[in-house]
Amino acid sequence: MALMLYCLAPLFAGTVAAPAQTISEINKANGFHEMLMSIGPGFTAAVKSAPGMPPQKVQDALAAAMEGAFDPEKMEAAIEARMADRLSAKDLSELASFYASPLGKQVTALEIQASSPQAREAKKIEGAKILGELPSKDPARLALYRKMMDDISAVDTGEAVGLNMGYAMLSEMLGAAGKPLPDDQVMALLRKQTEGLRRDIDNDAMESAAYIYRDMSMADLKLYEAFLASPAGSRYYDQMQVALGAVMTDEARSFGHRFFVALGYRKA
């Protein structure tokens, strides 16, 4: 996300430039906190929806390990600390200008709404339906969604975060069970278990885009894409995704420890 002034000049014509803000204020303005709030419930739902219902002992251990795990306030503070001083005052001012604009507020509202638990199922079902119709009905919109996902490196970042989290959790669990493995073997095991991960992330990202932005005009979508691709936007996303990945990996390692404590494999 960011502001390419020559692309967005018509949108901001006649407005007063927003003052430089902090990373914390930017993250609150763009719905980042709401996204973090959805991670814990989404993680639990993903585990519970895995093929074959986990036995009761595992379900109880999962519930115990999830207490305090992926806490949005803690993660947000850690992410902001990692992002501190990584963006210039000009970057922050341009980000603030976008999020204060009508388009910025519209996009933020749509993204927050789609991050709620109630929207999760609708996003999956309706998003898949819309995405399936786009190649024949509106290939230009489909291409724009693809460009937006590429602008923020959605698939690369999702795959990296997923593998790092999986590695941290699997290493912790194997160690707790007294069966540690060398790093290369852990990664080989993880990649076997996550075969198709990149394809699934790409599909989920495109389904989400198709659902979230379904009612936006092409003109507004093009302005939003220009914002995502702009220098300030690119820097913001790059720094945010690196920080998010590191914090999520730490949380996954901590979860893996608590999970195996709850299962009785190791002491707290």
Image (spheres, rainbow, N blue to C red):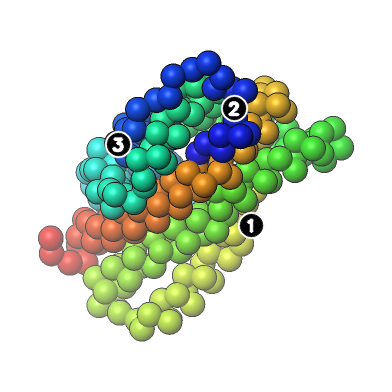
Residue 178 place in picture, x, y as percent:
25, 77
Residue 211 place in picture, x, y as percent:
63, 31
Q: CA distance from mark 1 to mark 3?
A: 35 Å
Helix, strand or loop status at disc 1: helix
- Tell me which numbered mark, 1 or 2, is placed earlier along the sequence: 2
Q: CA distance from mark 2 to mark 3?
A: 23 Å
Q: Nearer the viewer, residue 231 or 40?
A: 231
- Tell me which numbered mark, 2 or 3, is placed earlier along the sequence: 2
Look at the image and tell me in which quarter the C terminus lies.
Answer: bottom left
Foreground label between 2 and 3: 2
Helix, strand or loop status at disc 2: helix
Image quadrant of residue 136?
top right
- Tell me which numbered mark, 1 or 3, is placed earlier along the sequence: 3
Residue sitting at 23 percent across and 61 percent down? 257
State the mark number for residue 246. Answer: none
Query: Badge 1, how many Cα within 10 Å: few under 14, some, many 20+?
Result: few
Identity, as a three-letter code, of the amino acid under mark 2? Ala
State the mark number for residue 9. Answer: 2
Dots 1, 2 in contact, CB < 8 A: no
Query: Badge 3, how many Cα within 10 Å: few under 14, some, many 20+?
Result: some
Mark 1, residue position: 199
Mark 3, residue position: 22
Query: Badge 2, how many Cα within 10 Å: few under 14, some, many 20+?
Result: few
Task: Examine the rendered structure and indicate whether residue 53 appears above or below residue 214.
Answer: below
